[in-house]
Image (tube, rainbow, N blue to C red):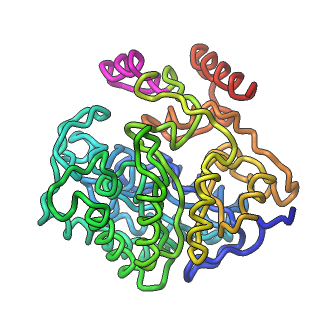
Amino acid sequence: MTNKIFEEAHIGPLTLRNRTIRSAAFESMCPGHEPSQSLYDYHTSVARGGVGMTTVAYAAVTESGLSFDRQLVMRKDIVPGLRKLTDGIHAEGAAAGIQLGHCGNMSHKEICGCIPVGACTGFNLYSPTIVRGLRKDELHPLARKFGDAVRLAREAGFDSVEIHCGHGYLIDQFLNPYFNHRRDEYGGSLENRMRFMTLCVEEAVKAAAGDIAVICKMNMRDGLKKGISIEQHSLPVARRLQELGVHALVLSGGLVSATPMYVMRGEMPIRTMTHYMDKAWLKYGVRACGKMMVPTVPYEEAFFLEDALKFRKAMPDMKFIYVGGLVAGDKINEVLSHGFEAVQMARSLLNETDFVNRLREDPHHRCGCKHSNYCIARMYSLDMACHQRLGETLPKDLQKEIERIEKEQNSK
């Protein structure tokens, strides 16, 4: 098989030195909602490790869009810090991307400073909190926040923006009938449910002004038994995004609320996740109900590939970026051989920030990630980190849980 990893990738006005991208997996490294030294150190180390582009994760376009208290929110006063970050990434030869989004109902007043908003009024069991449905007169101003965030990203020196249209966050809350029960022109038919996405992406494309790449992350499936279908829902959404002038699509799936492990795969280490929680009621509540609320979805390499190939076949003129379960050079080359413009990875580049350079030395290299999901369990309270790279000894109960999960995963 030809080694395609180190060919150039072309995404709109952007040329990458190779076809690897650090995906926008949440780092939880922004206390005070601003870039930190740890964020700088991590992304510059990934850039130094050979990646084509590294993507800063999930910056909220406005304060109401915050879902974590260690998450970026786009505003003028953080531009100098972001410029320092992009300069550092560029100095290592990589491009710099940033993911922009709004979490919608996946927040809490303590974090976002208001009653969380969504496509519809209701109650979010996963926060838990009351949610206020957005009024029609709020939608255009909120969509303009996406354009404002793109302009700030351009000013800060980013080469691309990734608009988050998936995973059950706000744009997806309008797209998906699981969340959207509106009776106005923003609810009902898929054409109507795409209206808010259209507003947001139009603003983003306009603000990019052809200078930087505009990428969208979207769901192929939501992971629900009777959820959205590729043919009737996701392909029409992808075609609309192409019509809007988006340069590439990242094909993902799952809902961070109802089906989180469909997004990430494997088992969530509940004891590890609750160990880092500081609220007793939340800690013991999650321990009691966590297995039910976060069911395991088996992990396998390239777990989204079968679905992603349906988009590749149906839309031959669109550029697609593959994400999901890539930890080895052989599988990455297999995915790229199907015509994907690039691949995104997160845990590979957390376990080995120089993973891409290692692939250059050995095209068959496999990273050392053992899929315990410790990094994910930890990120809800602290920064995302691989347990194999910590400079500390974990408590014995966490070690035991991690060892059990890794043993079960590696026996499959």
Say which quadrant the N terminus sits in.
bottom right
Magenta span: helix, strand or loop, mainly?
A: helix
* Part of the protein shown in magenta: 273-290
Give x and y (percent) for residue 200: 31, 69
Say which quadrant the C terminus sits in.
top right
State whether residue 17 appears in this view. yes
Total labels drawn: 0
Relative side of 359 to 148, left or right: right
Relative side of 230 to 66, left or right: right
Residue closest to the far front: 232
Relative side of 371 to 210, left or right: right
Name the image quarter holding residue 266: top right
Q: Which of 151/345 is in front? A: 345
Give x and y (percent) for residue 222: 44, 46
Give the residue displayed 66% in from the left and 50% down from the top. Answer: 349
- The answer to whether residue 85 is above or below residue 45 is below
Give x and y (percent) for residue 358: 81, 54
Give the residue displayed 68% in from the left and 71% down from the top. Answer: 93
Give the residue displayed 46% in from the left and 54% down from the top. Answer: 219
Question: Is 279 covered by the magenta stretch?
Answer: yes
Give x and y (percent) for residue 137: 12, 66
Name the image quarter holding residue 94: bottom right
Give the residue displayed 19% in from the left and 43% down from the top. Answer: 131
Q: Which of 177/6 is in front? A: 177
Question: Is 212 covered by the magenta stretch?
Answer: no
